[in-house]
């Protein structure tokens, strides 16, 4: 059992909501920062693969932190959403900046003989829209920083239904793509690593990483307290599934289940 462990390639769930829109320059004592803000803090506990493509699972606990400028309440938010700052928001369409924090991979504990993967981040943009009142489509494109030098694109569609005013069901398909530099970091095996680990050499290209589906049950206990139970299944595809790491040591089937709870603080600048 690992609490606050290394989660290779996993997102630390710091899902910051978007700003309500650009404020007038010089507004208030703090300029754009003036106005109503919120801070959401909480924790997520989950059982997930111990590294990208692993068949071994571990129990993890991760902090949840969300900071944003108050505005129109988002119709839907997913645990898969990464740190986001909305620059465009008209209710039906949102777009802006997005970031993701990534933990490293320690070869001594996870895949002996492979190079360690440094902790790092990904930064880029997101776009989302609501084709109906009960469905949201979202895309993120992010460039790796430090941990890898590739580009990753995540697409997700979620349908949601309020069973009661405080209980919501949601879920839908997911798909991820990446460039060769990303796959080389997490799934590649060079000659030196092959000799040290016993794995076959593998030099991946670009392509699809995974397809899958996810869902959640979210309970809004009070205006400030929210809890959810979630599950995700991803099937590794393309360069990921072809990796000798996955074929010889891991599994293409990746499952994550867990629960989370958060509390929101409101404040004014």
Image (spheres, helix red, strand yellow):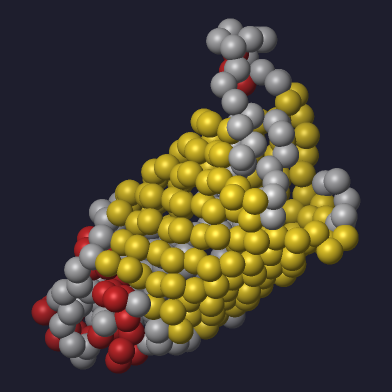
Outermost residue toward the left? Answer: 191
List x then y, in percent, for residue 26. Answer: 58, 8
Q: Can residue 109 be seen in this view?
A: no
- Left or right of 111: which side holds 191? left
Q: In this view, does 49 lie above or below 172?
A: below
- Left or right of 135: which side holds 201? left
- Left or right of 223: which side holds 171? left
Observer-nearest residue: 184 or 87? 87
Specify the quadrant of the image occupied by residue 250: bottom left
Q: Is residue 244 above or below residue 238?
A: below
- Left or right of 79: which side holds 228? right
Instruction: Please identify the quadrant where the C terminus is shown.
Output: top right
List x then y, in percent, for residue 25. Answer: 56, 10
Please count the marks in the image.
0
Specify the quadrant of the image occupied by residue 154: bottom left
Q: In this view, does 137 lie above or below 108?
A: above
Q: Is residue 93 visible?
A: yes
The structure residue drawn at horizontal position 55% and vertical position 60%, both measured from the top left corner, is 157
Instruction: Please identify the quadrant where the N terminus is shown.
Output: bottom right
Observer-nearest residue: 105 or 219? 219
List x then y, in percent, for residue 218. Answer: 76, 62
The structure residue drawn at horizontal position 78% and vertical position 34%, both measured from the top left corner, is 266
The structure residue drawn at horizontal position 59% and vertical position 12%, both measured from the top left corner, is 24
Q: Is residue 268 above or below residue 115?
A: above
Specify the quadrant of the image occupied by residue 43: bottom right
List x then y, in percent, for residue 175. Answer: 44, 66
The structure residue drawn at horizontal position 26% and vertical position 75%, both measured from the top left corner, is 239
């Amino acid at each position: 059992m690992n609490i606050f462990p290394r989660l290779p390639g996993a997102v630390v769930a710091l899902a910051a909501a978007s700003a309500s829109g650009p404020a007038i320059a010089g507004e208030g004592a703090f300029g754009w920062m003036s106005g109503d803000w919120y801070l959401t803090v909480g924790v997520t506990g989950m059982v997930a693969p111990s590294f990208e493509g692993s068949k071994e699972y571990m129990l993890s606990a991760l902090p949840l932190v969300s900071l944003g400028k108050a505005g129109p309440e988002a119709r839907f938010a997913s645990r898969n959403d990464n740190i986001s700052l909305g620059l465009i928001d008209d209710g039906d369409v949102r777009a802006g900046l997005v970031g993701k924090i990534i933990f490293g991979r320690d070869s001594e504990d996870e895949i002996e003989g492979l190079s360690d993967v440094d902790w790092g981040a990904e930064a880029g943009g997101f776009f989302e829209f609501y084709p109906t009142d009960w469905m949201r489509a979202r895309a993120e494109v992010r460039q790796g920083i430090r941990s890898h030098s590739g580009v990753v694109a995540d697409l997700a569609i979620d349908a949601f239904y309020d069973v009661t005013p405080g209980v919501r069901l949601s879920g839908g398909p997911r798909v991820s793509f990446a460039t060769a530099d990303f796959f080389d970091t997490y799934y590649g095996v060079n000659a030196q690593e092959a000799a040290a680990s016993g794995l076959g050499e593998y030099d991946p290209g670009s392509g699809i990483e995974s397809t899958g589906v996810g869902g959640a049950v979210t309970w809004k206990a009070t205006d400030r307290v929210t809890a959810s139970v979630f599950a995700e299944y991803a099937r590794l595809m393309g360069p990921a599934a072809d990796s000798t790491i996955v074929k010889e040591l891991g599994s293409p089937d990746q499952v994550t289940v867990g629960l989370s709870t958060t509390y929101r603080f409101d404040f004014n600048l």
